[in-house]
Image: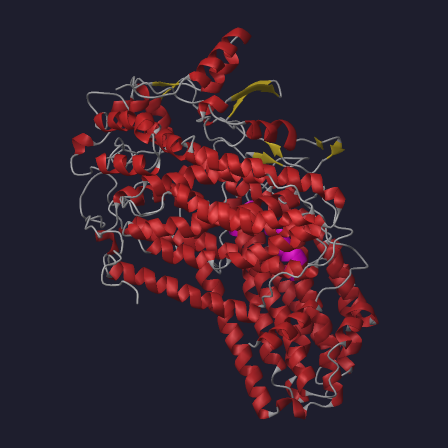
């Protein structure tokens, strides 16, 4: 279809909407934003007549590649270190995708612009596509990869696992609370425009380097829909900017959304890329280098900064602090170490790091070995059952961290720990911004103004509380992270499947008590808590030589 | 001249391929053959692709979601509360879409329709098919099919797209999302057909549809009921009112019992091809709707209260839909060739509606006979 006829067709389609006079559509999902003064902004034009065949063609390429991968025995050359992390990633990502579909009517309800409604409804179908195509990719992995355990329990594990819950923010955040905060700023302006670059472009690059060319095939196909979504989000953002009353809310939501996306996405994708790869070429980009390119330059400098000309206050300080955490504060490495510490309650296996890995990390992140090297050596030393407990329960100089009440990633940058009594409960936060998110942003009043539509932090936010003071073997059994012999664990702190004696079973966990740091915190006196917090912040958490 | 002789050749850097023997079956160990999703019970012996890619993707505190929903709304819980409809189910997860819609079916089926419509329109232009249309038929299509496309678009955006945020399971919401896609595609196809006709016929009024939909007497009760439907907050009532009542008594009456029946007699073999795709969509969408409401009327615990509830919804929505149907009666007289009466069409419509209610397990409401 020519550009001229596409414009004509699009203009015709806009005639389909009308101003209702008998009744107006129900507002199921409210917003504190106002769009009374908003000029109508046109999103990218898309009509169903061209949309369906375009997506069908993209699908044909994806499914052709899947057939080819099986015929070409792709799994002969896939790195297990890589595929194991996909058990976590692919258990999480279909939910955010389908949540994005579910978020579209929230934006439609909130924004009085029929031309955007059309684009949002098309995005809804895209997101159904993404969720189901990813579930199908995972099924292919389960069918063809050497170790299907973990893929086989995928959506159950996602729903009952600490890491799954961290990832679930990147999904529930799209569909809950103020319709514009959720479906526009968090989902589209930040998650899709900034962080899908690392999710769907940087990570698939790493997959290919590890012998897996199906992840790039599927995720690049997904990413090719994102430009339309980014256009939807930008149109709504510009409409919101037209009303001065929206500015404080926009600034609040940019701070929350940016920081939460950083905490969650950088934790997960950073770990997958840095610790899931066997490609240790020195000229291979590190996650930090990828982040600098895709997020700092492409998003922050090219997309966010120009918004200043509309008078919007950009969270420069939080962008710089995210960069600081990734580079100087070893954020990703601390997360990976935490995942590996908690291996018995995972549903994937984690390969230990070797000398080649150490050398690469030290080259890319100077000082890495002094902080993490000895711990990973201990991880390798303790990887088989029989003579020792899992590393989390051995004395290796690693203090199990408290969980951030807001982003639910643990408080791993220890000097930044915030402790506060909120809603009659002592809570820990990984950072000042996460504390602000709970105490200030997600409240029914913001800067003296009523914000009744803003969401609330709810649920059993500290995973450990659910399992406090129970036997670890019982916890793992109840979670279902046990293989089909009824005793061997799905998670293992190594990749050796050749010898049953190397595989941990429930018996190896029996007798280990599991405790919730938050329960313990709330049992402390004021002075005990202050002393503990000072010690927590001061502890470098380094394994001794 | 550049000193190319002494410049070091650029070394390409690429990852090394390593044979890892990570194929299925390379080793035997616990769970090495566990190659099915094991956290749900499939409807039949083996899970379908549809079940595999749909079930439990939207988690539920009543199934595996141990920490509950971690965000809430300002005035209530987050996630997908079952209280967002008055209908009740012992197990919402028992519903599976009989159409088994997922990514591949959505694009294959809709692309097939796009090709069918495109070929039909190309052939019509090549054959000069619109030249045979008399003035009365041109006016009928411009006004009435033109008005109807608004209804389709309104349902796409403010009925089905809305509902798919609210259902308690992924299976319900995905089925409704596909319904929204059907409606949007069909509404656009009608609009673009209208554009084609405007460009092909000097006498075709391609803009009159807006005025007809906004103010023509015969269409106002239809517009009223569409707008009133979009104002319903209860997602199941919205789905019931739209797919079980409105689409039966008004949508099908207009599309199937009028346009599809009389077009050929008026020298138009193009419109039925396009409108037929909408009927085909509705037939699929009615399939999942019927399955869902039948599940609710047959629910061991809540079947009776659901039947009462749906009876109240019928009492609420049948009268305005019948008003809309009756108001359309004058358009039966507009074409030059009048091959069937309004009474015949309405009679056939009521018969199909009655049959649908019987299939769902509901009594025919007394309002139908008024």
Q: Is residue B21 left or right of residue A227?
A: left
Q: Which residues are magenta?
A: B156-171
Q: Tell me where residue A282 sits by quadrant.
A: top left
Residue A166 versus residue A263: which sits nearer the camera?
Answer: A263
User: Magenta region, mostly helix, strand or loop?
Assistant: helix
Q: Is residue B4 visible?
A: yes
Q: Is residue B40 visible?
A: no
Question: Outermost residue toward the front?
Answer: B1
Query: Where is residue B222 shown, x and y percent of the image?
Result: 76, 65
Query: Where is residue B343 shown, x and y percent of the image?
Result: 74, 75
Q: Quadrant of the N terminus of chain A?
A: bottom right
Q: Quadrant of the C terminus of chain A?
A: top left
Placement of A36 over or under A11, stated as above or below: above
Q: Name which residue lies at 63% across and 40% down.
A: A253
Query: Where is residue A370 shown, x and y percent of the image?
Result: 31, 26
Query: Where is residue A123 shown, x and y percent of the image?
Result: 56, 57
Placement of A369 over or under B1, stated as above or below: above
> Does residue A138 show up magenta in the picture?
no
Tally of marks: 0
Placement of B44 over or under B249, stated as above or below: above
Residue A30 versus residue A416: which sits nearer the camera?
Answer: A416
Residue A29 versus residue A212: which sits nearer the camera?
Answer: A212
Placement of B272 over or under A348, stated as above or below: below
Q: Tell me where residue A542 sits by quadrant.
A: top left
Q: Is residue B217 left or right of residue A505?
A: right
């Amino acid at each position: 279809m020519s550009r001229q006829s596409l414009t004509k067709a699009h203009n015709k389609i806009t005639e389909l909407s009308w101003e209702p006079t008998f009744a107006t559509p129900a507002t199921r999902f409210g917003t504190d934003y106002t769009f009374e003064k908003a000029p109508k902004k046109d999103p990218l034009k898309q009509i169903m007549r061209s949309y369906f065949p375009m997506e069908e063609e993209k699908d044909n390429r994806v499914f052709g590649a899947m057939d080819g991968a099986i015929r070409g025995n792709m799994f002969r050359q896939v790195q297990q270190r890589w595929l194991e992390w996909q058990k976590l990633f692919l258990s999480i990502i279909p939910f955010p995708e389908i949540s994005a579909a579910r978020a579209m009517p929230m934006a439609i309800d909130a924004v009085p612009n029929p031309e955007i409604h059309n684009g949002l409804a098309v995005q809804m179908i895209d997101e159904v596509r993404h969720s189901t195509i990813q579930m199908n990719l995972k099924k292919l992995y389960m069918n063809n990869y050497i170790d299907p355990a973990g893929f086989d329990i995928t959506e159950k594990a996602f729903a009952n696992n600490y890491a799954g819950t961290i990832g679930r923010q990147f999904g529930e955040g799209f569909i809950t609370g103020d319709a514009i905060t959720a479906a526009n700023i968090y989902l589209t302006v930040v998650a899709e425009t900034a962080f899908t670059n690392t999710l769907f472009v940087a990570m698939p690059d790493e997959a290919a380097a590890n012998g897996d060319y199906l992840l790039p095939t599927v995720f690049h196909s997904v990413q090719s829909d994102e430009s339309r979504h980014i256009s939807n989000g930008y149109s709504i953002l510009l409409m919101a900017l037209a009303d001065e009353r929206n500015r404080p809310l926009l600034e609040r939501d940019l701070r929350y959304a940016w920081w939460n996306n950083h905490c969650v996405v950088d934790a997960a994708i950073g770990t997958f890329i840095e610790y899931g790869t066997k490609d240790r070429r020195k000229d291979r980009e590190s996650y930090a280098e990828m982040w600098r390119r895709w997020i700092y330059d492409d998003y922050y400098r090219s997309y966010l900064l120009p918004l200043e000309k509309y008078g919007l206050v950009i969270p420069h300080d939080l962008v710089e602090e995210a960069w600081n955490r990734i580079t100087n504060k070893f954020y990703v490495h601390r997360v990976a170490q935490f995942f590996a510490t908690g291996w018995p309650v995972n549903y994937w296996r984690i390969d230990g790091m070797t000398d080649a890995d150490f050398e690469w990390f030290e080259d890319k992140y100077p000082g890495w070995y002094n902080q993490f090297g000895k711990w990973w050596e201990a991880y390798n030393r303790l990887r088989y059952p029989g003579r020792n407990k899992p590393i989390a329960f051995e004395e290796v100089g690693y203090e199990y961290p408290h969980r951030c009440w807001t982003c639910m990633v643990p408080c791993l940058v220890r000097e930044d720990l915030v402790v506060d009594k909120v809603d009659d409960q002592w809570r820990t936060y990984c950072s000042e911004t996460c504390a602000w998110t709970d105490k200030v942003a997600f409240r029914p009043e913001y800067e003296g103004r009523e914000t009744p539509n803003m969401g609330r932090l709810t649920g059993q936010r500290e995973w450990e509380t659910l399992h406090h003071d129970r036997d670890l073997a019982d916890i793992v059994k109840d979670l279902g992270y046990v293989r089909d012999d009824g005793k061997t664990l799905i998670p293992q702190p190594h990749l050796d499947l050749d010898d049953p004696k190397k595989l941990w079973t429930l018996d190896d966990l029996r007798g280990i008590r599991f405790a919730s740091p938050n329960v313990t915190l709330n049992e402390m006196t004021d002075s005990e808590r202050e002393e503990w917090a000072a010690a927590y912040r001061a502890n470098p958490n380094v394994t001794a030589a | 001249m550049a000193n190319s002789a002494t410049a070091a050749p650029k070394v390409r850097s690429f990852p090394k391929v390593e044979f890892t023997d990570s194929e299925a079956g390379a080793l035997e160990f616990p769970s090495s053959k566990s190659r099915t999703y094991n956290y749900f019970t499939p409807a039949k012996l083996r899970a379908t692709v549809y079940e595999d890619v749909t079930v439990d993707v939207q988690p539920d505190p009543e199934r595996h979601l141990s920490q509950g929903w971690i965000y809430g709304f300002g005035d209530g819980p987050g996630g997908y509360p079952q209280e967002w409809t008055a209908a009740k189910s012992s197990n919402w997860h028992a519903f599976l879409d009989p159409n088994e819609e997922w990514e591949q079916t959505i694009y294959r089926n809709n692309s097939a329709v796009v090709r069918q419509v495109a070929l039909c329109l190309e052939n019509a232009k090549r054959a000069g098919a619109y030249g045979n249309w008399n003035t009365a038929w041109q006016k009928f299509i411009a006004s009435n099919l033109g008005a109807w496309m608004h209804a389709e678009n309104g349902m796409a955006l403010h009925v089905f797209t809305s509902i798919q945020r609210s259902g308690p399971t992924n299976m319900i919401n995905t089925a409704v999302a596909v319904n929204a896609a059907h409606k949007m595609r069909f509404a656009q196809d009608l609009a673009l057909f209208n554009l084609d006709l405007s460009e092909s016929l000097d006498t075709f009024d391609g803009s009159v549809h807006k005025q007809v939909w906004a103010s023509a007497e015969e269409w106002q009760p239809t517009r009223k009921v569409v707008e009133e439907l979009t104002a319903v907050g209860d997602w199941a009532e919205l789905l019931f009112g739209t797919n079980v009542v409105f689409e039966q008594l008004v949508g099908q009456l207009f599309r199937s019992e009028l346009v599809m029946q009389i077009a050929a007699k008026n020298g138009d073999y193009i419109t039925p091809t396009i409108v037929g795709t909408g009927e085909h969509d509705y037939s699929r969408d009615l399939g999942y709707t019927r399955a869902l409401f039948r599940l609710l009327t047959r629910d061991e615990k809540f079947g009776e209260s659901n039947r009462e509830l749906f009876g109240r919804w019928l009492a609420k929505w049948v009268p305005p839909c019948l008003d809309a149907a009756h108001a359309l009666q004058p358009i039966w007289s507009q074409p030059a060739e009048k091959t069937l009466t309004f009474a015949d069409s309405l009679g056939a419509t009521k018969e199909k509606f009655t049959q649908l209610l019987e299939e769902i397990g509901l009594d025919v409401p007394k309002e139908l006979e008024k």
